[in-house]
Amino acid sequence: MMQTPLTMTQMMERAEKYFPKKQVVSRTASGIQRFTYKQIAERTRRLADSLSKLGVTKGDRVGTLAWNHHRHLEAYFAIPCMGAVLHTVNIRLSPQHISYIINHAEDKVLLVDPDILPLLESCAAELKTVKAFIIMTDDKELPETILSPVYHYEKLLAEANPDYHYPEDLDENDPAGMCYTSATTGNPKGVVYSHRGIVLHSMALGLADSAAISEKDVALPVVPMFHANAWGMPFSAVWFGTSLVLPGPYFTPKLLAELIEQEKVTVTAGVPTIWLGLLKELDEGSYDLSSLRGVLCGGSAAPKGMIKAFEQRHNIPFMHAYGMTETSPLVVISTLKSYQEELDYEERLELRAKQGTLVPGLEIKILGKDGEVAWDGKEMGELCIKGPWIASEYYKDERTEEAFRDGWLHTGDVVTIDEEGFVKIVDRTKDLIKSGGEWISSVDLENALMAHDSVFEAAVVAVPHEQWQERPFACVVLKEAYKGKTTKEELLEFLTPQFAKWWIPDDILFLDEIPKTSVGKFLKMTLRDQVQKEALRKG
Ligand code: ADP
């Protein structure tokens, strides 16, 4: 067979050639803008030309600090296609972590949204490698800033060559992108994606038994473009000629519901927190979201109660999936086998609330105390993964040795696998609760609590215990209508028939909000501190 390189250049060129009329709908600070792929492809060439005029050359890192919009999409392709490396900076990290990762990646140029400027200015003095800042503004003039030198994105594009030719000598193993994990402890860890990895992962998202992204879809990545490349959705969408809807900055559940309705979105992706917010909006408002064929949900466990509510109350099907920044991210996805479709709804739901079966192209093994665990849905072990879109190391980081061993990525996620190969994430190792020498899954307790009618969100954490070592403690946010009405006792009673006695949380703390990480997951470290203080206070 021919050895043709799997590079990202072919993706944007395919959209340009075969899907010039298809649309990208982009919400920016000044409202909705519409572009065709013909326009996006030309603007992408212009951006690559501008960056090369600013001195960006092969292998240089170019950072983005931006929301999901068309200019970010142009950067997604211009940077790798010109041979440089797209570094998507998580704008919800602390200024210390932001300057750490920009310095660590040695970004040469930064593309920045105007509303992120104050954040970037607050760490400007720390930045050691950045030679130019490009502001992605809708305004005609640049905003005032202490950063220097600064350039106006649209002015650069206006002066650039629309026929810029991407280099033809890219190797498929060249770095194309990088992303840092959000790190709840220590500094964020960098992951470098190759062209080959991105191309193969993008293809996997198009498989019929995976997310099945196709030309006929209208895709709305709600997951930020700085969180594991918006789970690869923008790459696949461009390659397949899928219409894209990019929701821009500071969207609300209402705005998302309106965008889905107006643009007839068929497939969308995001973390459970986003969907819990949308569910509340749908329950209260009136929208026609019948265009949706699937909601891709991952990043943390999708509560069974939430999946059921979407499907039964609003007729919106869910696709539960699992992955990590280190895995591009798709690893397993919960699509049923043909003969499982015949099960009744509750049985199907039980299976689909698991994270699913392995996507073709990857390998997994689950390591327990005595080697690989049995496929019985009970024995727990650490999920280990290998494959062409799985990172082989952390970028210039000695923590590589902990996670990458014997050719496998050791994920730190504790899972079970059943007879049919469905993987269920039990917990992150550090979040498992060890009580009297046995493990309790915080995820299972949270899911059960969130299935109660009165509960909006629930997180369960460990508190140290003299006799049992650790005990579970639940934090619950009640829905507005139930505040002050639902009691601890009622919730504990609700859990009692569902779990062994020793699994039942020792106490429940009602909160107004569960603290979240920069990518919208429950921030268990902060919760643990809060809960331990509460436990001490009560003695
Ligand atoms: P971060 O590490 O910054 O939170 P990632 O998105 O890379 O960002 O996190 C990956 C982790 O998220 C996985 O290791 C796993 O613990 C968790 N995760 C991802 N998807 C799921 C899911 N569907 N169910 C439960 N946990 C999940």
Image (cartoon, rainbow, N blue to C red):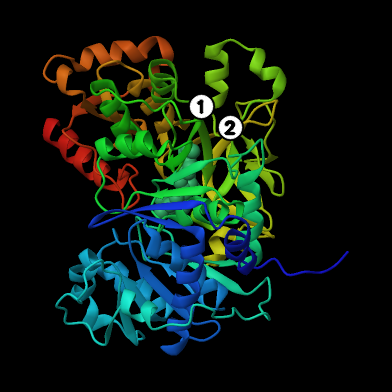
Quarter holding the C terminus? Answer: top left
Q: Residue at x 60, y 60 (%)?
A: 198
Task: Classify residue 129 by image quadrant.
Answer: bottom left
Query: Residue 423: where, in percent of width, then height?
Result: 60, 34
Q: Residue at x 61, y 30 (%)?
A: 335
Label 1 CB-ligand 1 distance < 8 A: no
| Numbered label attached to residue 334 | 2
Task: Out of 319 and 104, give the one closest to the viewer.
Answer: 319
Task: Classify residue 118 by image quadrant.
Answer: bottom left
Query: Residue 278: where, in percent of width, then height?
Result: 31, 32
Residue receiving disc 1? 353
Q: Is residue 416 left or right of residue 517?
A: right
Task: Out of 316 and 517, give the one closest to the viewer.
Answer: 316
Q: Is residue 79 left or right of residue 372?
A: left
| CB under 8 Å between discs 1 and 2 | yes
Position of 266 relative to 493 (above/below): below
C-alpha separation, residue under disc 1 versus residue under disc 2 = 8 Å
